Structures are given as C-alpha cells and as structure tokens.
Image (cartoon, rainbow, N blue to C red):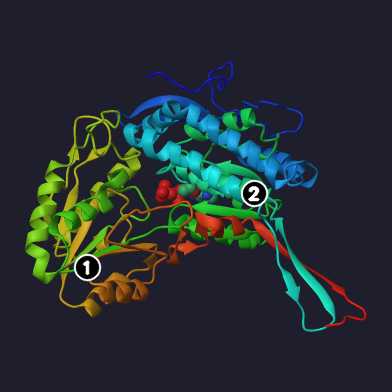
Amino acid sequence: NPLWIQGIPNSSGILGFPTITHPQAPYIVEYFTGNTFETIDPRTGEVIARIAEGDKEDVDLAVKAARHAFDDGQWPRISGAERAKRMMKFADLIDQNVEELAALDTIDAGKLFSMGKTVDIPHAASVIRYYAGAADKIHGEVLKMSNAFHGYTLREPIGVVGHIIPWNFPSTLFFLKVGPALAAGCTMIVKPAEQTPLSALYYAHLAKLAGIPDGVLNIITGFGPTAGAAISSHMDIDAVNFTGSTEVGRIVMKAAAESNLKVVSLELGGKSPLIIFDDADVDMAAQLALNGVLHNKGEICVASSRLFVQEGIYEKLVEKLVEKAKAWVVGDPFDPKVQHGPQVDKQQFEKILSYIEHGKKEGATLLTGGKPLGEKGYYIEPTIFAEVKEDMLIAKDEIFGPVLALAKFKTIDEAIKRANSTRYGLAAGIVTKDLNVANTVSRSIRAGTIWINCYFAFDNDCPVGGYKMSGFGRDFGLEALHKYFQVKSVVTPIYNSPW
Ligand code: ADP
C-alpha cells in the first residue's frame, strides 16, 4: 500500500508528533518512552505503519506547550478575523489534499473512499470554514441591571482543551472538536483513536502550513487508558471534550471530577429508534431504514439500529427491506460499487458477531445476514433481526455494526413508549405523511435530534448531541462554539444615572 503521509515519519519510519508540542523543539517525532504501536488495515488485517505511542510524559509536554501558547501566545490574543484567515487557509489545504486524506481514512478505518472524497473530507473543510466565519463574531451582552450599575459579559476562550476522539469518523470528529475550539481562541491537545491515527497526523501537518501557531494544536497518538487518561486527569487542562462509548465517557468524567474539575462534554453511545407509520411510502421508508443502520457499516453513534414498523405496512416493508439488504454490496472500500467496507478492527468484528449470536439465542428471528464475509479482513453481512423484544441484548446495547433490531407496533402511544425505552437518547427518525403524528412523536421522544422523513440530515448549523446516557453538550452549530467559552460578568457603578 502506498502511504500518503509526506514529511511526517522520522528517520526510523515512525509516525509521531508532526506539530510543535514543545516551544524549543519544532518537530518532535520520538515520543518520550520510545514505544510504538501498529495501525492495521481492516481490509486485510495487515500492518500499515508503526505509530509513536504517547503516554503521560508526552501529554505533559504537549500540555506545557498548549499552556504556553494559551497563557503567553498570540492565538487567543490576535483578532478573530486573523484566526479566521488562518482557519480558511487550513480548510483550503484540506481541499487540496482530499484524495490523500480520504485514502488515509479508508486504509485506517475501512471507510468508503468515494464517500471520504465527496463527503467526509470536504465536510471537514466546511466545518473549519463554518467556525472560521464565527471567529470574528464573538461577543457578550450588555446587561440592564436593576440598580445603578453598568454590566456586561465577555466571552473568553476557556483555555487549554483536551479532545479525545473515536475511530468511526476520524476526520469529521477531529474538526467538530478542533474547529470551534480554534475559533474561540483555545489551544488544544487531540488524541485520535489508536485504531485511526493517520489523518490526524496529516491534519496537524496542514495546520502548521496554514499558520496555526506552535503549541496551539498538538496531537498525541496512543491508547485510551494511558494517553487518554492522562488528558482527562490533567491538572492543567481546562476542558475535556470526549466522543466515544458511554462506558469510557463515565471514566473521563470521573477523572475530570477527581482532578481539577475541568469542564466536561460527552457525546456517547446511542440506540436510536426509527418509527415507520402505516402511511409511509414503502420503498422510500425501506431505503431510509437500511441506510440508517448500514451507513458507515453501522459504525455511527446515531445509527437507526432499532426499527419500529406499524402493523398495517409491516409485511410489505419487511419484504422490501430484506430485498434491499440482500442487494447491498459489501467489499473493498476503494471499489466505487461497494456500499460498505470492513469493520474497523478485529475486536469490533468479534464483538458484533457475538451480539449476532446473542440475538439468535435470545429468540429473535434472523431475516437476513448474520455471518462474516470473505477469507480475510473484517467484513460482516447486513443483518436484520425481527420480533426483537425490548429486554433482549440486541435491543438494549449499542452494537456499532450492521445489525438491525426490528419490531412491530400498533398505536402511536405504543411506538413512543417503546422508542423511549432505552438508556440512550441521541437521535430518532419518524416516517409519516401526517403532520400531527410527526409533531407529537418528535416532541415525545427524548433524544437530541429528530429526523422527520429523512435520516442523517446533518448540517454544520444544526446541533447534535445526547439526552440521557448519550451524554451532554452539543457538536455542530454555534452551540458547539459555546462549549469553548467562559462567560465573565463585568460590573461597574454608575453615579448620577439619569435612568
Ligand atoms: P469505542 O468503544 O468506540 O472504541 P472508546 O470509548 O473505547 O470508543 O474510545 C474512544 C476514545 O476514547 C479513543 O480515543 C480511546 O483511545 C479513548 N479512551 C479509551 N479509554 C480511555 C480512558 N480510560 N480514558 C480516556 N480516554 C480513553
């Protein structure tokens, strides 16, 4: 496999810090311990590259650099317009390197190359531009105080931020964290997932070319319990922003509480319901349901992994759904005809297959799929279980794979109750032509995003985040920008006020 990272490996071929993490050392490519780990191509199970393994000492160095860049550096102090200019350049550089970046995410995460080229990477650039557009529009409020005081609020950058991100959208999630934090004037440490470190290293390289100052954007490649834990428990990091499993989110929050009470935001797991009512168009609804669970091989936190279909349309819809699932093309993610590639790694692959076995044992009806595909790599057939009950593991747990849990319902109240019977609350979908039904259901479901007659309708301006155990805080939109501010109130007396 060609490796597209230019200028980043050190003399021993190890990929490491491409950006400045220490004020005196422009390109640190050796990590403190000198340890490395392998990143694997999920299409074959073979090693792509060796990556420097960051640990606590490396996090300390990176935080020192970020702290220096925040406390004494120019990034929080230059005008928002100047930050925007450099962020726009960063976005242009991403656009100029679309093929390489898409290829990195394909070999590292098994993501579709065609999708990376046309959606993920251009979207990453658009996220940076969206937040660049906000960088010179940051302001507080003037307060009309009750007494003879003049008051106003200032929005100040929150400080040094730690971003811990997962492997399913290495580029999108990188920029959903980095974009607003840069616009706000923060400095940061990013820890990409150990499964997918490649594009993050490339982004740091581009950031440097774009004129993002030394120490502002630091990448630590490494593992969660070591490098990730060093971030969440660090005494000099002001906020931690985590996307990943609910289980690790809890660990991150605990570490934040037990260290310096840093501000936490968590975007966690989901088990999102899609509810199809009798009046839906069968073909459109079946397509929506299938994309909803199979997009990115089901490795997406908002996947519609629970499907509820009203009894009048049930038979026709299930027939269509199974027909479409059987025609769904699984294979090499570089092939433009392929609709989904391999799961990210062996561990995920085995976890998904064990959930499928659970589904069979628990008495759900396997309508299609259920097996791995091919001789090598981590491919799994699109899998649909019917007659899934709420207490089954495949209805309760986030599987993060191409596995759909399907059930039939009679009334709108029943649909709402069953859709809400989950510990998660990230997203939900509704398919109906009846506005009253759509309005009632969308207000009754406890989830951060409701898609009506669509799914995955993301927009840079539209916040996404969780209710319940799906976390708190929002990505996307100006809501996300606000995570990176402190609000300071300034009050002064007014003598002889005429009002
Ligand atoms: P997934 O289950 O999707 O792999 P995880 O929640 O395990 O997601 O991982 C998401 C991110 O959290 C990754 O970057 C991972 O390295 C990191 N991580 C894992 N364990 C910890 C931990 N104990 N503390 C901090 N970060 C962690």
Find residue 203 and report its image quarter: top right
> Against 18, is 227 above or below?
below
> Against 416, is 227 above or below?
above
Residue 344 picture location, percent across and down: 35, 39
Residue 305 picture location, percent across and down: 27, 57
Residue position for label 2: 135
Q: Alpha-carbon distance for marks 2 and 1?
A: 40 Å
> Against 27, is 289 above or below?
below
Mark 2 Cα-neighbour bin, 10 Å: few <14, some 14–19, many ≥20: many
Left or right of 198 in this view: 365 = left
Q: Earlier in the sequence, mark 2 or mark 1?
A: 2
Left or right of 359 in this view: 49 = right
* Residue type of the residue flagged with mark 2: Ala
Can see residue 172?
yes
Q: Is mark 1 within 8 Å of ligand 1?
A: no
> Against 26, is 389 above or below?
below
- Residue lying farthest to the top in this orientation: 11
Give the residue at x 23% y 73%: 415
Q: Nearer the viewer, residue 421 or 453?
A: 453
Residue position for label 1: 433
Say what secondary structure mark 2 lies in. loop
